[in-house]
Image (spheres, rainbow, N blue to C red):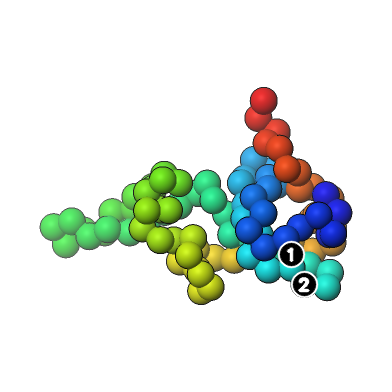
């Protein structure tokens, strides 16, 4: 994709990951990942790593921001070439 195609709120794919654009800079794009969520829960004093679905993370408000409950990643001009509006999994 070209830098000019990105805007805040745009969902796109990079590799096998689904992302949402959270900021557009002069030469970069910042995004949050929408398909991989891990959280730690405590049960009987033991930490348990749990995976959440998109629906669970969305219902918990993880995509409301800034600030976001998930990490933002910076895509530079070289990374943008690998981005697409469609998933590679067809």
Q: Which residue is mark 1?
A: 29
Badge 1 element = strand
Badge 2 element = loop
Which quarter of the rendered picture does the C terminus lie within? top right
For marks 2 and 1, give the CA distance. Answer: 6 Å
- Give the numbered dot on residue 25: 2
Q: Which residue is drawn at the image coordinates 74% and 68% (left, top)?
A: 24
Residue 1, placed above or below residue 78: above
- Left or right: residue 65 versus residue 29 is left
Q: Is residue 9 visible?
A: yes
Q: Looking at this view, is 24 or 46 the one in front?
A: 24
Q: Looking at this view, is 29 or 71 the one in front?
A: 29
Residue density around tag 2, few if under 14, some if 14–19, many if 20 or more, within 10 Å: few
Residue 74, placed above or below residue 83: below
Q: Looking at this view, is 31 or 16 the one in front?
A: 31
Residue extending farthest to the left is 44
Residue density around tag 1, few if under 14, some if 14–19, many if 20 or more, within 10 Å: many
């Amino acid at each position: 994709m070209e830098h000019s195609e990105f805007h805040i709120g745009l969902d796109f794919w990079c590799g096998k990951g689904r992302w949402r654009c959270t900021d557009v800079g002069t030469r970069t794009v910042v995004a949050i990942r929408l398909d991989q969520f891990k959280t730690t829960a405590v049960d009987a004093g033991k930490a348990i790593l749990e995976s959440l679905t998109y629906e669970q993370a969305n219902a918990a408000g993880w995509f409301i921001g800034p600030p976001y409950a998930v990490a933002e990643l910076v895509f530079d001009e070289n990374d943008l070439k690998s981005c697409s509006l469609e998933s590679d999994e067809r």
